Amino acid sequence: MIKKLLNYFLESPQPELKFVCLIPEVAETMPIVAASKTNYNWFRTATDVFKEQKEHAVGKSFRHIARCPGIISVSKTGWIQRSYQDIAIGTNGSGTGFDWSTPIDQANITTGHEWNYNYVSHHDDTVLSIYNNLKPHTLKTTIKIQSPWVVYIPPGHQLLCVPIPYPDDNRFTAAIGILDGDQGPNFLNVQIFWHSLNGTEVIPAGTPLAQYFLIKKQEVNTVIETVNQQTLEDLRLRRMTLESQFLPSYSKLKATFSKED
């Protein structure tokens, strides 16, 4: 009891991650949201199929992608930035050129401050593609979504920016990067690699563009070793915990190894 009280008073305040919107209306209509509140059509379909197949798998070992712990965990961790308006991207087959349009001219929205700019910009093909092998069917020009969001990352932390890990929309991929909390406010622009090279496509308002994970800066000891008795015992325990049920329970696995601690 005394130890718990000491820990309570000695603990540092909870870090604060703050998203600030330069356009007040966007904060109301399309805020940054927790990843756990974002749903994907493909996963809904997979869940429906899982429920249907489960009914016909009574008394049989059964696995399904809708219960994959890695997919579920990454999809429910962090935060999501979505497009607050439709974005039309047009390409002409050249592999470099594109044009764009949006229903709202972001650069001319009345905001009362100087941070007004187009919603879409770009880095031309001399910035990255001449140095880095892009995936096939990728525009060599990097499209830049100049979002109205700014983020304050707590000191001692970083914000990892990644593409949506398992998206519904595969026409683009967000670039990966890390923002440093010790560098003051950061713009949450989304650089995207575009994969539709001949024609006009629309990214609908509400489309998830990128996902963010908060990372604490800390040194960790890295250990590389050959297998030992403890590892073999842990693997046997893992196997017994999972395989003792026709439908494996990963929450049971977590509880098993939490007891070990």
Image (cartoon, rainbow, N blue to C red):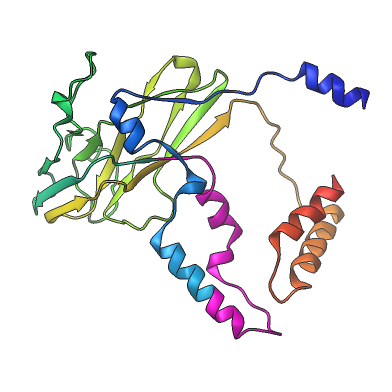
Magenta highlight on residue 70 = yes
Q: Quadrant of the C terminus?
A: top right
x, y percent for residue 69 = 60, 58
48 with respect to 133 (left or right): right
Residue beneath the point at 28% across and 39% down: 84
Left or right position of 134 against 10: left
Please give the range of residues in magenta: 51-80
Query: Is 207 placed left or right of 202 in the picture?
Result: right
Q: Is residue 191 above or below residue 88?
A: above
Q: Nearest the camera: 238 or 23?
A: 23
The quadrant in which the N terminus is found is top right
Residue closest to the eye, 159 or 26: 26
| Residue 100 x/y as whole percent | 12, 42
Compared with residue 102, is residue 71 higher up or lower down, i.e. above or below? Answer: below
Query: In terms of depth relative to the viewer, which is nearer, 244 or 227?
Result: 244
Task: Give x and y (percent) for residue 88.
Answer: 15, 47
